[in-house]
Image: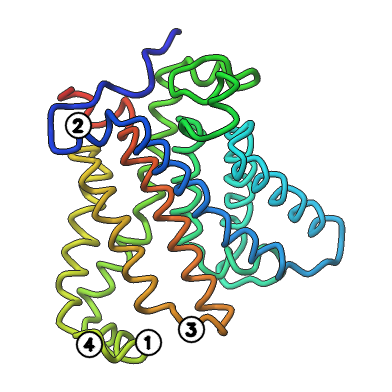
Amino acid sequence: MKAEPLVPRAPSDLFAPILSSDAFMGSLLLVGRLLTIPIFALQILNTPHTGALMYAAIAVQIAGLILITFGFQTRLGALLLAAFCASAALRLPGSTKFAGLLTSHWDKNLAVLGLLLFMFAYGPGRLSLDSLLGRGKPGNTRNGLFSSILENTAVMGLLLFLGRMLSVVIFLRAGTNKVVRTAVMQAYMVKHNSHVPTNLIYLAILVQILCPTLVVLGYKTRWGATLLGGFTIIAGTLFHNQYGDLGELSHLFLDLATTGGFMFMFAYGPGRFSVDAKLK
């Protein structure tokens, strides 16, 4: 079945001038792609170089990073990194035998996985080799191996629905945890940055419950993606700024990758199976 163009026309709302600017959107998606790079680079540098499985994991990540960085065969690169994240997520949380950094932060790993699905679905944006070669535009079916998938609206709708679900697991879990264990989480805030007022935890609860709900429903999705992306980058720089600590650095880089993914969600919207699509 033939698909309609993946990206709806820019709605007549606050974001319309931004969405209609090729220069701004191209720059936004370039930044979004580049933000996914640090966590995988860190993972490559800290993966034990022993055994065929480890070398295969390193090769997959290197290939994915090169493709995404240059925006060449970007969908293939996103799919490679998504497959790696999925394999890491299947390991027990906390395992260091394979994909240790990503596996130990399994809920953030799921968020990165979900948001890589958006990059696969929509391509790299204007500032990319794919765009120069005519393959990078959303809705363009000149994508070789993936054409049959990209043309199928039902498959793409389900893929983006799955991407939305995976992207917010970490936020719903963290928000619920803050409600149930408010005092403990306030102590965590003080431990990681004593200069941040602990009463801000209530604002964090609101963002981490309300915005994921919007993303799950696909209602006002761009608002949800914008707020979650902003929240993630702020929280990461405030509470994971101990750059000499590998665990804290990996948290920060995972936050950067998640923020980059939300840029793609902002740019292109939630997909077919969403309230936004029904109201379009």
> What amino acid does circle 1 point to?
His
Tag 1's secondary structure? helix
Between discs 1 and 2, the one toward the N terminus: 2
> What amino acid does circle 3 point to?
Gln
C-alpha separation, residue under disc 3 versus residue under disc 4? 23 Å
Between discs 3 and 4, the one toward the N terminus: 4
10 Å crowding of disc 2: few (<14), some (14-19), many (20+): few
Give the farthest residue toward the right.
51
Residue 186 placement (x, y as % from top left): 25, 86
> What amino acid does circle 2 point to?
Ala
Write down the residue under mark 1. 192
User: 216 left or right of 237?
Assistant: left
The quadrant of the image that shows the C terminus is: top left
Write down the residue under mark 2. 16
Q: Which mark is residue 183?
A: 4
Residue at 50% from the left image edge and 46% from the top image edge: 33
C-alpha separation, residue under disc 3 versus residue under disc 1? 9 Å
Q: Quadrant of residue 185?
A: bottom left
C-alpha separation, residue under disc 3 versus residue under disc 2? 38 Å
Residue at 41% from the left image edge and 49% from the top image edge: 166
Between discs 3 and 2, the one toward the N terminus: 2
10 Å crowding of disc 4: few (<14), some (14-19), many (20+): few
Residue at 47% from the left image edge and 54% from the top image edge: 110
From the viewer's perspective, is the residue at label 1 or at label 4 nearer? 1
Write down the residue under mark 3. 242
User: 108 left or right of 230?
Assistant: right
